[in-house]
Amino acid sequence: MNVQVIDGANGFVGSHLIGALLARGDEVIALARASVEVVRRRVADALRCLGFDESPVDRLRVRRLALDEPDLGLPVAEVFAEPCTYWHTAALVTFFPRREVELLNVNVAGSANALATYERHARPGSRYVYIGTAYQCGLDTGGPVPEDWPASDSPDRFRNFYEYSKREAEIALARSRSVGEGTVLTARLGVVVGHSCTGRALTDYGLYDFLRVMAFFARRNPGERVRLPCHPDANLHLTPIDTTVSRLLSIAAADLDRPIFHVVNGQTVPVRDLFEVLNAWLPIELIPATPEQIEDVPFNRFEAVVNMRAKYTATYFRHRYDFAWRDLAAPPAVTAEVLDRLISWYVREGLPE
């Protein structure tokens, strides 16, 4: 069995992927900026979250990663001693402004350095798996978005610079020698959330950033009513971490003739349904509103403040997204029951005091 090399090892997806690989008996080398202790703790938490015993973490080899150094600062003779599957999960995820240079350095230049290091040192029989985002489609939502390599577009055609940086990284990857040789897979993720059976989530990104903002205002102003701008058919491609990891493992073992996969569910979650569940668990009433409705009745002061605080994540409510996807080890849809479990766990266990 090939060695599994995973960068971004202390991230949400990376740590759970490592946990699943260790649990099935694979040899794993974890690469991260964080210390060995931090990585092992994150992976142990991920193993527990996935329902596994945490003892396999003792077998984990952890090596320091530096995306801006030659050969990533790695002991390449050790890391690439055998054929491997190299998983590039490391990324900077932020929707906030004034982080453009950092996003380019990590998500574009850092990804190019990871690929170049792999191409220089990986043994024959290796493959490279790039973890991207389905939302690299930007504002082009005349979908379904195809599983094809993207074309260049200007930054103003994206909801945030994070999306643009992930698009640029894919464009660079498409031009690589490894793509020409057929040894690359690109897995574009949806909105990754907690475990489908328990609701447990070891992250504060994405949906959970929005939940945290809503809970902050709900606790301080219980009973308030808030409208948020939404597309009439706004939807979310929520993918629980357990089914996301299972799908990634299936994709990594697939044929390489079609190298791009959207790791999403065929059935999406309407934003209206999300608001209903949130309204049931928090003392606040969230209401989807069209831009025309808001223009007719402008925000009151409280609504304006909430929308300002939530604007970086709530922008995803203003569009409908459809992605081409293949029924390859298809994960189950996020049902109403699963959605309630995800929200209720975070309200009870994940929110700051």
Image (tube, rainbow, N blue to C red):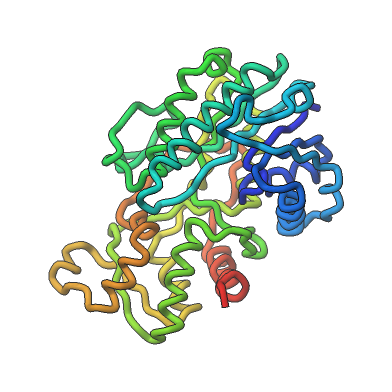
**Residue 169, horizontal then vertical, whole percent:** 46, 31
Which residue appears at 45% of the width and 42% of the height? 102
**Residue 334, horizontal then vertical, whole percent:** 54, 57
In the image, residue 197 above or below residue 60: below
Viewer-closest of 109 and 50: 109
Outermost residue, left side = 296
**Residue 244, horizontal then vertical, whole percent:** 61, 46
Q: How many marks?
A: 0
Viewer-closest of 343 and 35: 35
Which residue appears at 40% of the width and 42% of the height? 163
**Residue 147, horizontal then vertical, whole percent:** 45, 31
Q: Is residue 149 in view from this perspective?
A: yes
Which residue appears at 23% of the width and 63% of the height? 290
Q: Would you identify the image quadrant in which residue 313 lies?
A: bottom left
Horizontal arrangement in the rendering, residue 98 relative to residue 328 (left or right): left
Q: Is residue 141 in view from this perspective?
A: no
